[in-house]
Image (tube, helix red, strand yellow):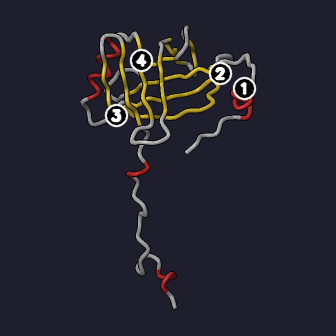
Amino acid sequence: MARPLSTLALQELFASESNEVLLVLFKFSHSDWSSDVFFVNNTETITSGGDDYTSYPINAMFHSTGDTDGSMAIDCVERDFLALLRGAAGKDEKTEIELSIIFASQPSTILLSQTYKILNLSCDKATINVTMSRDSIKDEPYPSRTFNVNHFAGLWRS
């Protein structure tokens, strides 16, 4: 389901020239961690909502079809963060990634926010590759009740 952007955000996105820069904030969280981890795809650290987002080169891709909603590659990762992700990978509870889009000039104004869960994690010497997904709508019970005479008697009146 598409999430609406503000009129201002749409104008800046579709303008032939713009002074605004869109940034993506990434908040990684897990209940076993003492604190959340914050990254921004920028060349400098940004403060948004009272949290400092550390600059990291992050390449995120989102899919419109398939079993997953997206994938992400994080370069030049600290060993401490990699250890956190690896430690949480074997748990029943999945690590959550809250992705927020902001304008660089207005870092505390969130234009769009979406939460994902890490499904798969792989890494090499310099890059962490993550496969992520939102809660699947396929897992939702539908219909929650069947249309039968006990629950919906009015449907079977003659």
Determine the secondary structure under disc 2: strand
Q: Position of residue 151 (x, y in %)?
A: 43, 76
The span from disc 4 to disc 2 (Cα, nearest Å) is 21 Å
The residue at the point 41 percent across, 54 percent down is 140
Residue under circle 1? Answer: 12
- Amino acid type for the residue under numbered disc 2: Phe
The span from disc 3 to disc 2 (Cα, nearest Å) is 29 Å
Whether label 1 touches label 2, CB < 8 Å: yes
In the image, 77: left or right of 113?
Answer: left
Residue under circle 4? Answer: 74
Q: Foreground: 5 or 144?
A: 5
- Amino acid type for the residue under numbered disc 3: Leu
Give whichever of discs 4 and 2 has the lower sequence position.
4
Q: Foreground: 120 or 79?
A: 120
User: In front: mark 4 or mark 2?
Assistant: 4
Residue under circle 3? Answer: 119
The residue at the point 50 percent across, 40 percent down is 64
Determine the secondary structure under disc 4: strand
Residue under circle 2? Answer: 103
The residue at the point 62 percent across, 24 percent down is 102
